[in-house]
Amino acid sequence: MNACSTLIAGASVLVSAVVLHAEIKVVADHNAATQASPGFKFKNVPPPSRGDAATKAGFTIVDGAKDSNGGDVDRLHDGRVPTDEDQPSENFFFSAGTEGGRLLVDLGGAIDIKQVNTYSWHSNTRGPQVYQLYASDGGGDDFNAQPKKGTDPEKSGWKRIANIDTRPKEGESGGQYGVSVVGSDGRVGKYRYLLFDISRTEGTDSFGNTFYSEIDVIDLNGTEIAEAAVTQPISKTFEAEGGKYQITIDTSAAPDLTEWAEKELAPVAQGWYPKIVGMLPSEGYEAPTRVTIRFREGMGGTPASAGGGGINCNIDWFRRNLKGEARGSVVHEMVHVVQQYGRARRNNPNATRNPGWLVEGIADYIRWFLYEPETKGAEITQRNISRARYDASYRITGNFLNWVTGKYDKEIVRKLNAAAREGKYNEDLWKEHTGKTVQELGDEWKKVVEEKVAAGASAK
């Protein structure tokens, strides 16, 4: 049959889908970031299910590679969904910087499929869904169960069901997305295999691969369909600066850290988040007013990370560092929440890329020299003098920025931040504001710290 193009109104956005067969229709909903909730409640798309046909199906990556920060492909049919917009380990997504990939779902035998539902959630461009859906009963001599990229599935025993693209035509793309591929007569067809040919949502940076939370396949003759289990969160929201900012701390995955988080971490976040916002302004910019600090497992050796308005805290690391660097590490991540340098690349295709050493250096400058200077955690000593370069990142760059601030321009960090956020950072800014190139400043600073270290050694 001829393909037809359909516009489908979701909860708050127009999305497009090309329907390949007259008996198939696509329903898509979008909950904006401020409307999203852990239950994945949509206006038209049913909530995620457990006990559906996908629960016991086999999920295989046919082409592409999963991102090391995300969950395994089994996350897509475990009956669990994320409780927040930025939980990489609770979602499956293809590796950063890649074009996406293909996923195979083997139901174990041909069934009458009533619906195929897909769900995603992210604070930014990883929220929308872009994929082509194919189906097959596995019959025919030409059937290829795992067609790689470059192989046309329709020439390998597959039938293309629909093209999905839920990227908003305007407005913010973050939030929750639900897509339901359904048969107008209540039946998609009788198939054993489904193939998802997934594309990234944008290529302006490396982070365009969708956070897929769950894939449901509803059996027309199935009886055990129930709403997906959602972990009951242990969370509390704290207001800062008279209610202008709301900071939610979620310890659902680590109840033993709840008391510490509320008594020790919350006051730091309440006091310092507004301070950081004030330190890093730029024209026309408003920092996120809602921040979620979530404790989670599966972060390997990373103490903490930030993305959008969320901060992830490594449970094991925090348990070991409650009396040490735990609070300071969150201050560092709050700086990243305020920085929001990725917005320039989304709004300006000609935006310059900010050097990572400066991004992390600003965060550690604020942490070590403004939040906890008494710890002297970013001092240059005999132990690290060999690595003392202005672009060494983190503490060392923080030390360099503190020195430039004190000797040349007390507003240098504010000025560099504003340029970086607008995608206008370049090395000429150093000479413009200090009269010296960054390399010249680095050499002068290095000489100063070397003399200080040598003086300390001789005094012993």
Image (cartoon, rainbow, N blue to C red):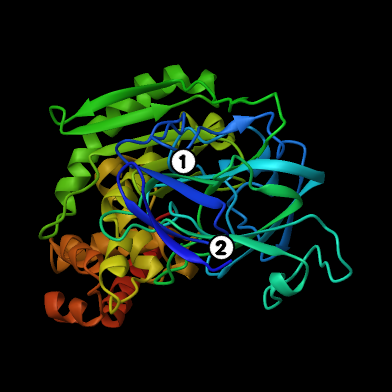
- Front-most of residues 425 and 252: 252
Q: Is residue 337 above or below residue 417?
A: above
Residue 456, visible in the rendered structure? no
* Residue that sits furthest to the right in the current view: 141
**Residue denoted by label 2:** 20
Secondary-structure class at tag 1 = strand
**Disc 2 to disc 1, how far (Cα)?**
41 Å
* The N terminus sits in image quarter: bottom right
For the point 51% across and 50% down, the residue is 25
Residue at position x 68%, y 33% in the image: 52
Q: Is residue 94 left or right of residue 208?
A: right
Amino acid identity at mark 2: Leu
Where's residue 156, x and y in %? Answer: 77, 71
Toward the viewer: 77 or 250?
77
Residue occupied by mark 1: 312
Closer to the observer: label 2 or label 1? Answer: 2
